[in-house]
Image (cartoon, rainbow, N blue to C red):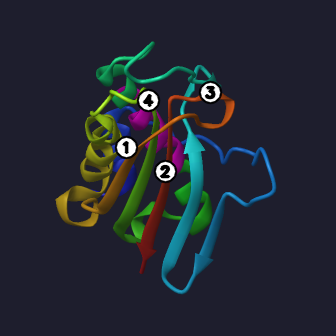
Amino acid sequence: MSVYDKLTQLGISLPPVAVPAAAYVPFVKTGNLVFLSGHVAKKDGKPWVGQLGASIATDEGKQAARAIAIDLLGTLHAATGDLNKITRIVKVMSLVNSTSTFTEQHLVTNGASELFAEVFGPEKGAHARSAFGVAQIPMGCCVEIELIAEIG
């Protein structure tokens, strides 16, 4: 099954690449790697604001991370022209806007990690990962995720 068949099966439409909000580009290709800039959580096209451990629970944060993963797939498609060229999701870095006592950043980030495994399969979708709790994210968003992928 192709990546696009899997996306259709999951009911996912790829969004267009978001226009950068500052002085950076959405992705950089070098060799066989594609580096995607951080994508912030959006809900209904607007920043998904809030803080884990205060105004947002882990399950909602996980939904936000999944939404970011879909945006990342849109950017990855723009960078490669074909998601079937992805040979591996290499690394995911997740920043979770959270209180100093919140300790479930890894569970929030699973929202993205699990989607990548669903879309690309357990081998290509499995990746190295970091999940950090941070004091703030641009525009007050609850989660930001960046990605490195390998293309063949």
Q: Which numbered marker is on residue 144?
A: none
Residue visible at 18% across and 58% down in the picture:
122
Say what secondary structure mark 3 lies in: helix
Residue 104 visible in the snapshot: yes
Q: Position of residue 148 (x, y in %)?
A: 46, 66
State the quadrant of the N terminus.
bottom left
Q: For residue 64: magenta?
A: yes
Identify the residue under disc 2: 73
**Numbered disc in front, either 2 or 3:** 3
Horizontal side, residue 129 vs residue 29: left or right: left
- The one nearer the camera, 143 or 122, is 143
- The one nearer the camera, 125 or 119, is 125
**Numbered disc in front, either 2 or 1:** 2
Residue visible at 33% across and 38% down in the picture:
105
Q: Which numbered marker is on residue 98?
A: 4
Q: Position of residue 95 (x, y in %)?
A: 47, 44
Residue density around tag 1, few if under 14, some if 14–19, many if 20 or more, within 10 Å:
some
Residues at discs 1 and 3 in contact (Cβ within 8 Å):
no
* Label 4 – label 1 distance at C-alpha: 30 Å
Question: Is 134 drawn above or below residue 129 in the view shown?
Answer: above
Identify the residue under disc 3: 140
